[in-house]
Image: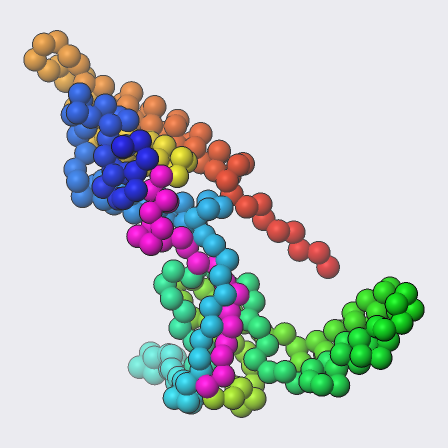
Amino acid sequence: MSQPSSRQGLIDYCLRKLGYPVLEINVDDDQIDDLVDDAIQYFNERHYDGAARVYLKHKLLPDEKTTVRTNTTNSTGNSSVGITTVTYQETNNFIQLPDTVIGVNNVFKSDANTISSGLFNIKYQIFLNDLYYYGALDLLNYAMVKTHLEDISRLITPDVQLRFNKKQHRLYLDIDWAMVNENSYIIVDCIRIVDPSDFSAVYNDWWLKRYLTAIIKRQWGQNLIKFNGVQLPGGITMNGERILNDAIREIEELEKELKTEYELPPMDMIG
């Protein structure tokens, strides 16, 4: 099928593009499996449709709250060669995230101790007392007051300070864990890969199909290059180097296309 909906369907599609079954594609099945994994990983990390923004919530259990407030002790140095042994501690103030999460944007505040919460918050009072005067409410003044109150709220209860590395899958939260109630929820604004095993439409992505075809072609050329110039029965001469060079050129064009058309541009930092 020209619209693969499975891993094997994608492999068969790429092999047909390379000439199979008319031509014998000299690439081992294990090599193809590795290339599929590499292509999907590259797609997930760089393509706009390879990842999605999601909100994950995690219920903080009592034993987890105890764990995040403990320390891990480590030592370094070698006294046998005169290097002083140094002991240091690291707080286990992290929660484990799924392996599919590759980025974290924000963690919502876990408490509501702000000046604008509850029954007597400013927004509620303005709407309660002034909104019935249609036209009397100055929208500009209201927006400026809200902005000012948000600045004060951010100073009183700062945003959650976090650290995350996708190789560790640990979300470190530099907060006062004593202020976080047990069985409360931590809501994480994060980026999660689009797993093709859950969303089969990934296998039919136009760029991914062409990219996987190109890297299989490159592997084919690498496998044949040591037989370059060997003449087969019937006078056919093998030219693995030509296949390899064509594949490298196609890969360069596809990666350039990914950066210019399918990859999100980096965000500028202002301030």
Indicate the quadrant where residue 201 lies: top left
Q: Nearer the viewer, residue 168 or 13?
A: 13
Indicate the quadrant where residue 232 lies: top left
Residue 183 image offset from top left, x and y in percent: 46, 86
Residue 190 on the magenta segment? yes
Residue 119 on the magenta segment? no
What residue do we see at 44% from left, 82% from top? 60
What residue do we see at 55% from left, 71% from top? 107
Residue 190 image offset from top left, x and y in percent: 50, 63
What residue do we see at 50% from left, 65% from top? 55
- Vertical arrangement, residue 191 with respect to residue 28, above or below: below
Asked if residue 156 can be seen in this view, the reply is no
Q: Nearer the viewer, residue 237 or 98?
A: 98
Q: Residue furthest left?
A: 233
Q: Total label count?
A: 0
Quadrant of image for the N terminus:
top left
What residue do we see at 75% from left, 86% from top? 120
Q: Which residues are magenta?
A: 183-204
Indicate the quadrant where residue 210 lies: top left
Q: Nearer the viewer, residue 241 or 189?
A: 189
